[in-house]
Amino acid sequence: FSDAFRTPGGLTPNVVTFTTAMNALGHPGHWQATLHLLRLLTGSRQVNAVAYTTAIRACALPSVWQKAIALLEEMRGRVEVDGIVLNATVTACQKASAWEKAVELFEVAGDHGLVDVVGFNAAMSAWAQGGHWQQVLHLLRRLRCSQRPSSVTFNNCISAGEKASQWQMSLEMLQEACKEGHANHVSFNATITACERGSRWTLA
């Protein structure tokens, strides 16, 4: 590492120190600083999957989501790509509204058995952004085959119905969320909005 990062006692920060700093900075508002720290790590050959995952999460912006993809490709030649980093990349693309890329990466991760409920939720939100409510329901069925849905899962389904003017879907998903103990204020508010948009104000 650069001498500029040495402590007063002459100690040199290690990969844990740098990944801790990256986590502190690791949100879209500080993506440049996070990538700078990653470059220092790659230069020292101490980089690991945690560092790449943190950097990828910091790139969840419409203007820089391509950097998340580039980091994923770069990572393949350095450290093992696992489900955590793939799900983080899917989420970064989804948050940056690059929903088509998010879905594409989700399917790649799924082909390798590397998706968890976080990845499913990100992909469902991505499909909802594109107005593909049928795909959201399809992913819910796929998720149930191996994992348990979360509150976020049901909220994504409800939101998909709202965005696509499918108020019946939103209402049905709210009922399922209540039955499984996953309904919260987000669920109810999104369902109310869906019913209002569908001119079902008596249900809202």
Image (spheres, rainbow, N blue to C red):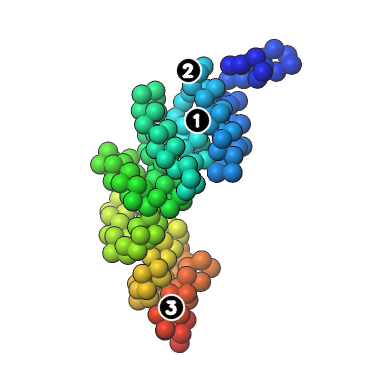
Side (left or right) of 180 relative to 18:
left
Q: Nearer the viewer, mark 3 or mark 1?
A: 3
Q: Quadrant of residue 141?
A: bottom left
Tell me whether circle 2 and circle 1 mark residues in contact (CB < 8 Å): no
SS at mark 2 in the image: loop
- Location of mark 2 (residue): 45
- Location of mark 3 (residue): 197
Above-or-below relation of 34 to 178? above
Dot 1, crowdedness within 10 Å: few (<14), some or many (≥20)? many
Which mark is drawn over residue 51?
1
Distance from disc 2 to disc 3, alpha carbons, whole Å, reads 54 Å
Above-or-below relation of 149 to 5? below
Check disc 3 and give the amino acid type.
Answer: Arg
Dot 3, crowdedness within 10 Å: few (<14), some or many (≥20)? some
Task: Tell me which label, 2 or 1, sits earlier in the chain.
Answer: 2
SS at mark 3 in the image: helix
